[in-house]
Amino acid sequence: MHRLGLVIPLISEARALFGRGGWMKETNRSWRRDALGTDSDLLSLCSGPGRRRGAEAASWLIGQGASCLASIGIAGGLSPDLPPGTLILSSEDWDGREGEGEGRWRRGGLACVDQALLTAEDKAALFRRSGALGVDQESAAVMAVARAAGIPSFALRAVCDAADRTVPAALAACLGPRGNTRLLPLLASMARRPALLNEALVLREDFSAALQALSREWRTVSEGFLAHVMRQDVAGAPCNITSASSHNRT
């Protein structure tokens, strides 16, 4: 029996994967358990954003019996050829070649930052330094916890803001700690700068494209990953696949 632990940073991402119902709520924690095939199940935790929360969520999932981990959510684009909605698959333990060949996702690295990168200039600079396809705040931490525990992991991230898009700081400031929109600050910002309305609509469209891509493919990726893990178990081989293109950059 394999249990895949999913670290999902934002409420909106969690709803894209599972919908609104079925979540168990405890103090500062929302989680759920679901079947995944006949020999596996999922334990999912909505962690909140950030490296520390990602690591804490990964450790909690392992404590609850997770035998492998995944970080699933949105990312900023770093590679200039990735439009909103492009899926990035990063793993040291599974190549995921099948879906890449069909154009359903791209394999490559994810950079990790402590604060969201808002400007096209900052994203371009990080791309030059790291070569990573995208950037988020949790995946490297989740995969580091998995590595330390000796269990396999992957990250699946959907590009929201493309590499050439600058997100206005005034809009970013209207996001709550779990990715929810703080309506009153948003309206106040738009009253001061009416041009933000168009920026907000574009960002909403890109965010929707990212969530739709996650909703469409996350289960296929998870099942493929678990099938690989189970094949490795039967063969008695380690899961690790070391590749410069699959590493997460910190």
Image: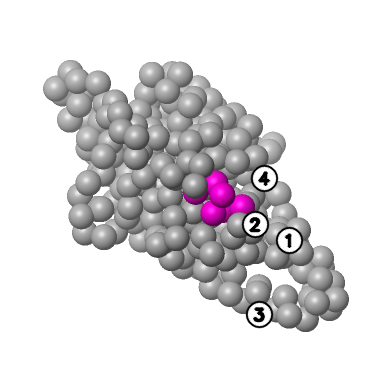
Q: Main secondary structure of the magenta part?
A: helix
Q: Earlier in the sequence, mark 2 or mark 3?
A: 2
Spatial separation of the CA atoms under disc 2 and disc 4: 9 Å
| Residue 194 image point, x, y percent | 78, 81
Instruction: Look at discs 2 and 3 and give the one toward the viewer.
Output: 2
What residue type is disc 4 on? Answer: Gln
| Residue 34 image point, x, y percent | 40, 43
| Residue 51 image point, x, y percent | 60, 35
Q: Which residues are magenta?
A: 122-127
The disc label shown at residue 118, or none? 2
Spatial separation of the CA atoms under disc 2 and disc 1: 7 Å
Q: Earlier in the sequence, mark 3 or mark 1?
A: 1
Q: Is residue 82 above or below residue 157?
A: below
Q: Which residue is mark 4?
A: 115
What residue type is disc 2 on? Answer: Leu
Is the C-beta separation of discs 2 and 1 under 8 Å?
A: yes
Q: Secondary structure at mark 2?
A: loop
Residue drawn at x 77%, y 69% is: 186
Q: Which residue is mark 3?
A: 198
The disc label shown at residue 169, or none? 1
